[in-house]
Image (spheres, rainbow, N blue to C red):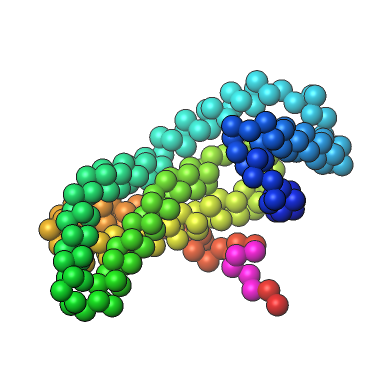
Amino acid sequence: MTYAMEAADIDNPASRDINNRAFWYKLQEIFKQTEEMIKEIAEQMGVDLNSIDTKTISEKMDIQEATADSHELVVGAHCYGKMADIWLDSGYAIFGKKKEELNNLLAIGIEEVKIHNEAADIQDAVEVIRWYQHQIYVKLKRALIKDDLFDENAEVMLSDANGSVKVALIGMDRSIGAWGKLLDYFPEKTDDVLDILLHLDRLRRKTEDMFPQARSFKRPGFDHMHC
């Protein structure tokens, strides 16, 4: 539905301009359609939206989030996010130095293909780290938040948790690989990168110990092959 709506507006740049009235009109229409869909689905499921005690639910969610935030896995993931930020934010100088070094080699015609590949490798590694940096925290927290909707179905609750944890583990795997690439290209930062790798590997092993079935969990639409 989102694709159809965006395709319909492809010839109307004003609908994508936050400073244009058309953008806000489109957003209003999206909210309206979403509200209508929620009401329709709720009616089909026999849910009375007006009877929901939103205050109590909100208070429960706050408690659940606070409990999850204090869990060692979530604390570790949050710590990793900060470590990555510190390293990358302080790494602009070495990135600039590396760029200058590669440009100098290009200027004198030394192994052009190899230099382009090295630059691409560094860029890819940073993009992978940035992509998963906070996702790991979010997915682990999601897995550790107890959802009252699933209280009567432990299997559904476990599947939801394992699915979230699998995404977090994939993020850790790929992030470790990316940090390994940076370690190859920036040997002068070995100690700092090894600290991050050690922290991330410990987090990964603790996560696997706590959720031993996560790796083998089959995510619908992702891990199932379709003809």
Q: Residue at x 83, y 30 (%)?
A: 48
Q: Is the stretch drawn in magenta largely helix, strand or loop?
A: loop
Q: Is residue 188 magenta?
A: no
Residue 60 quadrant: top right
Place of residue 75 in the rendered image (x, y in percent of width and height, measured from the top left): 37, 40
Total number of numbered discs in the rendering: 0
Q: Is residue 12 rendered to the left or right of residue 219?
A: right
Answer above or below: position of 192 versus 23: below
Q: Residue at x 65, y 20 (%)?
A: 55
Q: Indicate the quadrant containing the C terminus: top left, top right, bottom left or bottom right.
A: bottom right
Q: Residue furthest left?
A: 188
User: Outermost residue, top direction?
Assistant: 55
Q: In this view of the protein, can residue 72 be seen by the observer?
A: no
Front-most of residues 191 and 129: 129
Near-viewer residue (39 or 45)? 39
104 and 2: which is toward the camera = 104
Q: Nearer the viewer, residue 122 or 136?
A: 122
Residue visible at 61% across and 25% down in the picture? 58
Identify the residue at image location x=29%, y=60%. Answer: 179
Instruction: Examine the image and state in which quarter residue 105 appears.
Output: bottom left
Q: Is residue 224 magenta?
A: yes
Q: Is residue 6 above or below residue 33?
A: below
Image-based side of 174 in relation to 21, left or right: left
Q: Which residues are magenta?
A: 221-225
Q: Quick check: can you spot residue 188? A: yes
Q: Position of residue 133 (x, y in %)?
A: 39, 49
Residue 62 versus residue 168 in the image, above or below: above
- Percent position (x, y) of residue 15? 67, 40
Please determine whether, in this image, residue 73 is positioned above or below residue 177: above
